[in-house]
């Protein structure tokens, strides 16, 4: 906060000096000079503002409440922290990743330390607002001082159950060390019972002096991190679950010594496996409670207030990137489309992903940031186990579910799709029907839609590679024997026909990715077999796919077009000379494919025609050309087709004209 204010003062002083200079010039009748100074002044102010934006780093990924408040970009969540501390119930909450759970934990921990950091919150609800006690009486927060045990389970090593146990005891040891009671506890090295270690820690924290209350605040962040990404049928998972089950059993036994036990995670799936110790959270899951619907994330008014000084910056950046004109209202519409529309209760406000909003206002680039923060393996593992469940039109689809469906916790395989997608953040509440208690779930925004599509595509491409492995003998034989109809039938039936809706949309690049993954599988672990390259550079462009069969001294150059023609594809290969660097090969094969994306066409999302051009070395080592061949799909097979010479010439002329224009430029 102080740093920001100082930069603002420097800017104001600079502007004042320049303004005085401008007035001085005007006094002596230097109109022309004054005009120039005025223009310079505007430019300097803009440069200073941009420099200030660069220096003013936003708290992206920072979960320390002190740092976030001092940055000036903290959305007040202190009423929730106060409510939890006053009510003193064991409380459980799930939220998607990167949504502010750890910052909330930091907020509670800092407030629980009492008067020490009270002034840090002087502009926030906990300092100025009022709460209700258990009798409904209006009270101010009392700033009692509690010992805090703060455990971040994402830092635990789960390689083995013994390592997990030792690591958990290390966290407890660090908590004891913070209050100077570590010497009164069992040595954490080599001691088997972390349960008794925890009990011993609680007893020592209860009798702390210096104004501490005899009640403990226990905060556990990412409780499911050690187990949720493991194979649930593995011994490692079962052993690690037992460690956590034992820990929560002792947590439950000491619950009466705690003012607050607060547990957060990304999913609720692991909670059911934690045995009776997790029963303390029954009836105290606030994940869908209306009163806690905005406990994490930004609301629209937060963005308008907190980021007021950055709108001009992002407007300039967006205009540079897109060439379009933006207003503040236009920016708000754009970030609402990309990062908003999360709802966590039947009547809750529409929330923005805080990490993505901060990233946008830092970079001024409207894109998906959430995908890069890492996905829970639980989702990816479910996709790999049964990818067909995810082959849906997610953008249009609505799921109608009850509250029990959303927070489904039974440990079974496969998991409920609705619960899985909601708890991992890919679905959110759209509407609620009180008549039947049903929620309608949907994808919240563009960023999430993009992240889901990328995840599904990656899994499908991995699967496509496996399909290629399965068919590799047939594909390689068809290539070597120049059995082009057979090769094309394999491309059509084994490759494109097996592709999901999400992985293959109305984009030429999708067709390329699918075929590349398939051929990658064909060449996988093939000793001396072809090497696959995608978008390999040549002198005048990049070929879609190149298969370099070193063993047989042959190269295959593949170009795909969408809703055009095989002639257009082959002409591009030839006129851009994609195979020029391979002139020493014994054989060069150009393969031009046309793919169809048209729901009215029988060939929708598949190839409909191909053209083959082959060059071979003769006895004098000169490359000679075979007559071109064309194949079209008709009556469930590829048959010889008629080459459209006019289209070939049209493409050739267009490429030559483009070269001429670039040369003149």
Image (cartoon, rainbow, N blue to C red):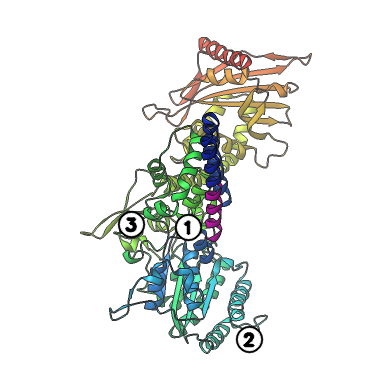
Residue furthest toward the left? 435
Identify the residue at image location x=60%, y=85%: 181
Q: Where is residue 380 in the image (x, y as percent from the top left)?
A: 51, 53
Q: Where is residue 508 in the image (x, y as percent from the top left)?
A: 50, 30
Q: Residues within 10 Å of mark 1 (few under 14, many from 20)?
A: some
Identify the residue at image location x=33%, y=66%: 291
Distance CA(mark 3)–CA(mark 2): 48 Å
51 displayed left or right of 101: right
Q: Mark 1 points at which residue?
A: 73
Please determine whether, in this image, residue 465 is positioned above or below residue 422.
above
* Mark nearer the N terminus (1 vs 3): 1
Q: Name the residue under label 3.
A: 349
Question: Which residue is nearer to you in this view: 229 or 472?
Answer: 229
Q: Mark 2 points at which residue?
A: 186
Res 634 quadrant in image: top left
Question: Magenta-highlighted stretch: main secondary structure?
Answer: helix
What secondary structure is marked by label 1?
loop
Please determine whether, in this image, residue 327 is positioned above or below residue 119.
above
Which mark's residue is nearer the viewer, 1 or 2?
Answer: 1
Q: How crowded is mark 2: few (under 14 residues within 10 Å), some or many (20 or more)?
A: some
* Mark nearer the N terminus (3 vs 2): 2
Please determine whether, in this image, residue 615 is positioned above or below residue 556.
above
Extent of the magenta region:
1-14
Distance CA(mark 1)–CA(mark 3): 20 Å
The disc at residue 40 is none
Q: Is residue 487 magenta?
A: no
Which mark's residue is nearer the viewer, 1 or 3?
Answer: 1
């Amino acid at each position: 906060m102080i740093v920001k204010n100082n930069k603002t003062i420097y800017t104001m002083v600079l502007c004042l000096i320049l303004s005085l200079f401008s007035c001085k010039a005007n006094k002596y009748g230097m109109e022309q000079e004054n005009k120039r100074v005025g223009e310079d002044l505007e430019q300097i102010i803009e440069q200073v503002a941009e420099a200030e934006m660069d220096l003013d780093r936003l708290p992206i990924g920072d979960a320390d409440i002190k740092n976030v408040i001092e940055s000036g970009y903290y959305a007040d969540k202190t009423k929730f922290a106060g409510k939890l501390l006053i009510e003193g119930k064991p409380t459980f909450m799930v939220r998607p990743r990167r949504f502010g759970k750890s910052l909330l934990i930091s907020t509670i921990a800092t407030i629980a330390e009492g008067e020490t950091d009270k002034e840090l919150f002087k502009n926030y609800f906990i300092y100025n607002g009022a709460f209700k006690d258990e009798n409904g009486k209006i009270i101010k927060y009392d700033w009692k001082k509690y010992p805090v045990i703060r455990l971040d389970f994402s830092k635990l090593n789960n390689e083995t159950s013994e390592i997990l146990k030792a690591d958990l005891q290390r966290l407890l040891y660090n908590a004891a060390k913070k209050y100077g009671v570590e010497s009164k506890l069992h040595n954490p090295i080599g001691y088997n019972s972390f349960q008794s270690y925890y009990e011993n820690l609680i007893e020592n924290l209860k009798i702390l002096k210096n104004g501490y209350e005899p009640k403990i605040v226990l905060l556990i962040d990412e409780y499911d991190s050690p187990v949720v990404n493991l194979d649930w049928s593995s011994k490692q998972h079962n052993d690690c679950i037992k460690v956590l089950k034992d820990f929560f059993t002792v947590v439950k036994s000491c619950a009466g010594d705690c003012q607050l036990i607060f547990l957060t995670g990304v999913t609720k799936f692991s909670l059911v496996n934690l045995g009776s110790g997790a029963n303390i959270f029954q009836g105290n899951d606030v994940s869908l409670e209306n009163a806690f619907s905005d406990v994490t994330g930004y609301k629209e008014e937060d963005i308008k207030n907190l980021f007021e000084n950055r709108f001009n910056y992002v407007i300039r950046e967006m205009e540079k990137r897109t060439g379009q004109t933006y207003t503040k209202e236009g920016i708000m519409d754009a970030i609402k489309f990309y990062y908003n529309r999360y709802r966590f209760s039947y009547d809750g406000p529409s929330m923005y992903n805080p990490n993505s909003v901060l990233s946008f206002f830092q970079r001024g680039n409207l894109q998906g940031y959430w995908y890069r923060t890492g996905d829970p393996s639980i989702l990816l593992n479910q996709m790999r186990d049964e990818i067909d469940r995810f082959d849906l039109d997610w953008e249009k689809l609505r799921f109608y579910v009850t509250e029990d469906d959303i927070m489904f916790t039974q440990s079974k395989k496969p998991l409920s799709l609705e619960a899985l997608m909601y708890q991992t953040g890919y679905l959110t509440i759209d509407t609620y029907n009180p008549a039947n208690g049903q929620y309608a779930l949907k994808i919240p925004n563009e960023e999430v839609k993009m992240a889901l599509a990328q995840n599904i595509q990656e899994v499908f491409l991995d699967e496509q590679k496996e399909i290629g492995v399965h068919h590799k003998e047939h594909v390689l034989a068809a290539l070597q024997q120049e059995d082009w109809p057979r090769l094309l039938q394999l491309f059509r039936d084994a490759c494109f026909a097996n592709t999901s809706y999400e992985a293959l949309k109305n984009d030429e690049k999708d067709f390329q990715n699918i075929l590349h993954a398939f051929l990658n599988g064909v060449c996988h672990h093939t000793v001396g077999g072809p090497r696959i390259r995608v978008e390999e550079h040549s002198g005048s462009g990049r070929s879609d796919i190149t298969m370099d069969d070193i063993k047989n001294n042959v190269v295959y150059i593949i170009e795909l077009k969408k809703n055009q023609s095989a002639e257009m594809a082959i002409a591009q290969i030839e006129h851009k000379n994609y195979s020029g660097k391979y002139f020493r090969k014994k054989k060069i094969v150009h393969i031009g494919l046309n793919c169809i994306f048209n729901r009215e066409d029988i060939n929708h999302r598949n190839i409909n025609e191909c053209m083959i051009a082959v060059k071979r070395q003769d006895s004098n080592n000169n490359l000679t050309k075979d007559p071109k061949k064309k194949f079209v799909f008709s009556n469930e097979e590829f048959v010889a087709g008629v080459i459209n010479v006019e289209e070939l010439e049209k493409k050739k002329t267009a490429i030559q004209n483009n070269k001429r224009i670039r040369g003149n430029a």
